[in-house]
Image: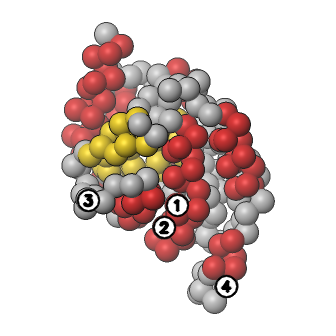
Amino acid sequence: MPVDQTQLEQVHETITVCCDCKREFRSAKFSVVCPPGRLYPTPPQNVTVLFIGVAPPRAGEHFYTLANDGLQRGLFSVLSECGFECRTIDDFHAHGFYLSHTAKCPIAGTPKPKREVCVFCTSKYLPAEIHALQPDAVCFLSKTNGLASCAVSARALGYREDVRPSVPFQLSMAGKVIRVLVTGWPGRRGLAACRHDLSPFLAPLKARSA
């Protein structure tokens, strides 16, 4: 199904002015920085796989804005190994791939995420993004914070079973069946799991494009 561009635009515009984390975590020992403007480009008309990163995007330093971004390098490498050559964002989108994040707000002074921020932000925006993007599949790129955020999104979309890393499952959204996977971040300790899990997960897409 094609992306609902109107709904997605509304979600992304709401994100650009959101400061709910500052109120939610007012007494926390960390400081949340509001989203640095518009975070995401226009998606492909039909999204085959929505990838979900974890680390919140910082101004000029995330998947879509930094050529040497670690997530971009790692994911493009694994996708190329799976037969989906990716050298640029245009290549990535040409395959029908798109990427969002669990948390839209960075934490001041660090590129690392906070799980409570990831889960809170996910509950507010990610199910709505998934609904607007209408992907054929969703892949969370983290077995820790990503797993927690996946569980929140799945429950919001009606899934009632346990979510486990490296175990694909299906959920139904508006009559459409969506395949979902939680795998490792494609770098450091998560790279081997990402390579192992993504190849079979993307196999139906590969067969369809053959």
Q: CA distance from mark 2 to mark 4?
A: 16 Å
SS assignment at label 1: helix
Which of the two discs, 4 and 1, labels the residue nearer the N terminus? 4
Mark in the foreground, 3 or 2: 3
Q: Position of residue 206 (x, y in %)?
A: 31, 20
Q: Position of residue 56 (x, y in %)?
A: 57, 59
Callout 1–callout 2 Cβ contact below 8 Å: yes
At a point 33% along the width and 39% down the height, the residue shown is 179
Vertical relation: 3 (above or below) 110: above
Q: CA distance from mark 3 to mark 1?
A: 18 Å
Q: CA distance from mark 3 to mark 2?
A: 18 Å
At a point 65% along the width and 57% down the height, the residue shown is 58
Vertical relation: 95 (above or below) 196: above
SS assignment at label 2: helix
Callout 4–callout 1 Cβ contact below 8 Å: no
Q: CA distance from mark 3 to mark 4?
A: 33 Å
Residues 92 and 132: in front is 132
Residue occupying the far front of the picture: 175
Q: How many marks?
A: 4
To which quarter of the image does residue 23 belong? bottom right
Which disc, if any, is residue 161? 3
Which disc, if any, is residue 122? 1
Vertical relation: 51 (above or below) 25: above
Q: Amino acid at mark 4?
A: Arg
For the residue carrying disc 3, how many other residues have a C-alpha within 10 Å: few (<14), some (14-19), or many (20+)? Answer: few
Residue occupying the far bottom of the picture: 27
Q: Is residue 111 visible?
A: no
Q: Amino acid at mark 3?
A: Glu
SS assignment at label 4: loop
Residue that numbered label 2 is attached to: 119
Which of the two discs, 3 and 1, labels the residue nearer the N terminus? 1
Residue that numbered label 4 is attached to: 26
